[in-house]
Every structure is written in C-alpha cells, then in structure tokens.
Image (cartoon, rainbow, N blue to C red):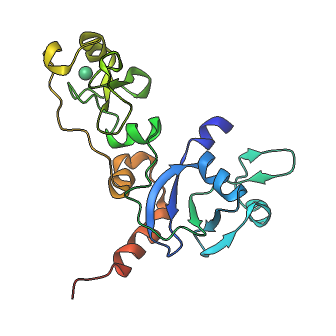
Amino acid sequence: MTHAVLERPALVLNRAWAPIQVTSVREALGLVAKGAALIIEPETYRTHDLRTWNDVSRAKEALIRSARLALAPPEVILLTSYAGQGARSIVFSRKNLFRRDRYTCQYCGAQPGPEALTVDHVLPRSKGGVSTWENCVLACLECNARKANRTPEQAGLKLRKAPRKPSWKLLTQAAPRERRESWDRFLSRAYWEVELEP
Ligand SMILES: [Zn+2]
C-alpha cells in the first residue's frame, strides 16, 4: 500500500507557482525533506514543511508513516529556489516514460497494461544505443520479442511517432486516471497568469 502511495503523481510548481513537471510522491517528499520544496495544501494554498504537514495530515488520510511522521501524500509541491521552466527538468524515469507514451506500445498501439509493457531501446544497447528520451519507447512483450537486438527497420517494425523529450503539459495530460483534481486550480492559475504577447 505504502509503496503504491509513494508512486502516486505530484505536481511540481516553480517558485513563481507555475507548474513545471509531474514527479512521484516519493521524489516530492525527498525534495521537501531536503528543504528544496514545500508542500502546498491545495484547499488553502498554505505551504508546509514536513513537520507542519504532519499536523495538517491528521485531518486527512495519513497513508505514509515513519517512526516520527504520519503524512498524507502531497499532491502539489512548490520548489523554493527554482524559478526556471520545466522543459529541461523533466526527469528521465520509467514512470515518466510510461506517461509520455500513454501506456501504449509505440510499435503496434496495444495497451496491455503496465506489467506487459517494457522499455525498448530503439537503437539497441548492444549497438551503442543509450537511455534517453529520444532512444527509449514503450513496447509490448510481443513487439519487444519480435524486435530483439535489432533496429526497428531490421525487425520490420515502425515507430508510431518519433520519441521526444516530453513537456510537463504532456505529462499532466498523459494519464487522466493519474491526475489529481487538486491540480486544476494550479493548472488554470498558470493559464490566467501566462504572459501574453504584446
Ligand atoms: Zn506492440
């Protein structure tokens, strides 16, 4: 249970309260523990460190327990020093790759569920392929077996689209079942506060 809770998505805002990426509850708590971020209580916009969040969590479902703390999983965090945009900061992680590819095999379009999808290196590692956004895609077990240690061309497979580094927008839209309702007020806030062209 705790493990699944830690893998839930958390929205990350830069210090200007602009959404920049989606991370996991685990990573979010790590940033807060380091003092690099604060947890936002979406209903009140109040910000918390772990100690005050522990107090607030008493009125919520405190699903994450350690010796000293009982915490509700944070849904939104605020970075305390980072002011930049998210484009460069999206972590290349398994979880984010699943979100980018929408839990879909990038060769045949199957959606067999996360357990039946693997991360495929388009140019195989044995041929010098590296683990990057541009060289990794989700593949179902069948396509993965068919491709083996070959390029898509050699295996007679075709990518549905060229793999790219995703934007935070794409990640927040990627898996609707993972979205948190509490994000809406921050995402629409970004909409209202975006700078318009003169
Ligand atoms: Zn497939």
User: Is there any visible trace of residue 135 in the rendered image?
Assistant: yes
| Outermost right residue | 67
Q: Quadrant of residue 130?
A: top left
Instruction: Name the residue: 39% across, 27% down.
Output: 113
Looking at the image, is 189 positioned above or below residue 26?
A: below
Question: x, y percentage for residue 118?
Answer: 38, 23
- 128 or 6, nearer to the observer: 128
Could you say where residue 180 lies in the image, as x and y percent from the top left?
Answer: 48, 56
Report the front residue among 54 and 81. Answer: 81
> Seen from this angle, which residue lies furthest front?
128
Relative to 31, 133 lies left or right: left
Quarter occupied by residue 85: bottom left
Q: Residue at x 39, y 31 (%)?
A: 131
Image quarter of residue 184:
bottom left
Looking at the image, can residue 1 be seen? no
- Would residue 164 appear left or right of 59 to someone viewing this image? left
